[in-house]
Amino acid sequence: MPQLHSRSEESSHPTSEPSPTIARAPGKIILSGEHFVVLGAPAVAMAINLYSQVHVVPKNGSGLSVTADIPLRFLAGKSGNPPDPGELLLPLQMAAEATLKQTGSIDHALQVDVECEIPVAAGLGSSASTTVAIISAVARSNGIEMSKKKIFQLGFVPENFLHGKPSGVDQAACIYGGMIQFSRPSNVKTVRLKKDPVLLVCDTGIHHMTRTLVGGVVQKSKKEKKDFQNYLAKVREISSGVARSLREGDDEDLGTLMNQNHELLRKIGVSHPKLDHLVEVARRAGALGAKLTGAGGGGCVIVLSPSRGVRDRIARVLRREGGTPYKISMDTGGVESRPA
Ligand code: MEV
């Protein structure tokens, strides 16, 4: 992966001719607060070292051509309805078009090629990562170094289409990198870590539709107001506890809070028997904490380990149980772009 750079301040010199550009953005995991963040509670999220990369070059003729090399193999044969590749391209096209409009370059003819190494529909931020990389690359190809705030706002165009009612936490994590505490509408605080948590991601191989899951929780929260008030109060405590334990390097506390968060997510019906099984197996194999991450209904669990040795052992056990483990670490750069 080439070294990519971006300054976060905007320098607005739209060019008459677009130039070749490359950008990349990380995926993400959520340590606490998913779903409840849509309803106003804070979430803690971390950018991870799985990336999407975007190349933009001027092309002959007119309009936008978007191609995507997306790990669809992760979907093949595992979930009921693998998405149509055309459907996957639509939000990418929307991100590029919205950026051209925003930068006053709607007449530029561009070829946009996306490569994504983040499993799709697994809760690891593949859609947010690809769209923020596209926004950053297309803007820069038109001579504009877009600010992180502006990328965040534009990121809602494809995310609204995909998720219906996104909180913005996914694109914030992919844009800012590192560990963040996020609350709606756009409150992003960096969480400074005393030490890096030893984390493992494990994919169930069952893939989900974030839009359906988020919509279901929003409906439920309207019907079960009293319960949700309690859950939201609990999640506020959990997320501020998670941020505190990360700042203090208190892994025991962090693990306990992750376990509590998983229970709440089970209560609101977004877990899945395979997620619960992998969480249980990880805890029995020595994890300090384990929970589903992202929208749930399948997708991934995250596991906190006391050491790398224990993490490697847990990874072997989870693989035997049918999961696909990834030993991830934190990305600190967020979205970055440079001339190609
Ligand atoms: C998905 O990664 C996180 C959710 O909370 C949805 C959102 O915040 O947009 C489930």
Image (tube, rainbow, N blue to C red):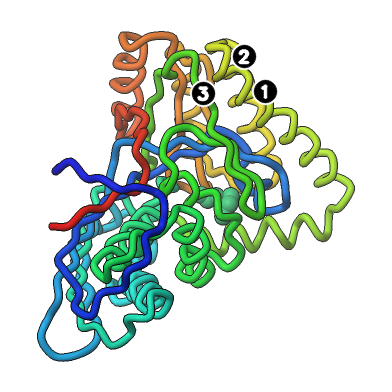
Q: The residue under label 1 is which amino acid type?
A: Gly
Q: The residue under label 3 is which amino acid type?
A: Arg
Disc 3 residue lies near ligand 1 with CB under 8 A: no
Residue visible at 22% across and 62% down in the picture = 114
132 or 114, nearer to the observer? 132
Residue 251 pos. (x, y %): 53, 12
Report the Cα–Cα distance between label 1 and label 2.
Answer: 8 Å
Whether residues under marks 1 and 2 lie with C-beta atoms below 8 angstroms apart, the answer is: yes
Residue visible at 58% across and 43% down in the picture = 188
Which residue is labeled 2 in the image?
Answer: 253
Q: Secondary structure at mark 1?
A: helix
The first of marks 3 and 1 along the sequence is 3
State the residue lying farthest toward the bottom.
Answer: 61
Report the Cα–Cα distance between label 3 and label 2.
Answer: 17 Å
Relative horizontal placement of residue 92, taking residue 154 as reference (left or right) = left
264 or 115, nearer to the observer? 115
Residue 7 pos. (x, y %): 34, 47
